[in-house]
Image (cartoon, rainbow, N blue to C red):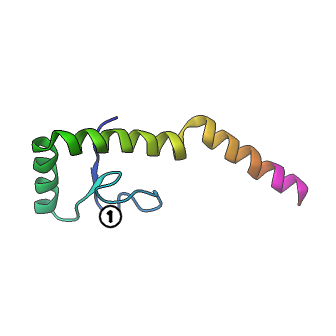
């Protein structure tokens, strides 16, 4: 439940969008600006905190991952 700042490479394979789920910054200046922006904007910080938490729960929660793994094994057995 905290706002996230990451590089484009750092979120490869994660279905997240800039300013919707997190802040993306690829240079040190962009990183500093994003962090300052989050520190100054309570609303954005709160929104991104909730969005990041929902994203993780929806895509990477243990239950979700376990269900995907079970489905994978079921498909493998059928093959």
Which quarter of the rendering shows the N terminus? top left
Range shown magenta: 74-78
The answer to which of 6 and 20 lies nearer the viewer is 20
Position of residue 48 relative to residue 14, above or below, is above
Residue 75 in magenta stretch: yes
Position of residue 27 relative to residue 32, above or below, is below
x and y, in percent, of residue 29 in the image: 10, 61
For label 1, the crowd category at 10 Å Cα-Cα, with few meaning under 14, some 14 to 19 and many 20 or more, is: some
Residue of label 1: 8
x and y, in percent, of residue 58 in the image: 53, 43
Q: Quarter of the image holding residue 26?
A: bottom left
x and y, in percent, of residue 42 in the image: 17, 39
> Under tag 1, what secondary structure?
loop
As drawn, the residue found furthest toward the right would be 78
Q: Residue at x 17, y 45 (%)?
A: 38
Q: Which secondary structure dominates the residues rendered in magenta?
A: helix
Which quarter of the rendering shows the C terminus? bottom right
Q: Quarter of the image holding residue 10?
A: bottom left
């Amino acid at each position: 439940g905290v706002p996230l700042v990451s590089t484009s490479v750092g979120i490869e394979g994660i279905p997240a969008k800039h300013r919707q789920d997190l802040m993306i910054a690829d240079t040190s200046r962009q990183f500093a600006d994003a962090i300052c922006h989050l520190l100054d904007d309570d609303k954005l910080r709160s929104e991104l905190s909730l969005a990041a938490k929902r994203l993780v729960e929806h895509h990477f929660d243990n239950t979700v991952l376990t269900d995907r793994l079970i489905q994978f094994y079921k498909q493998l057995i059928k093959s």
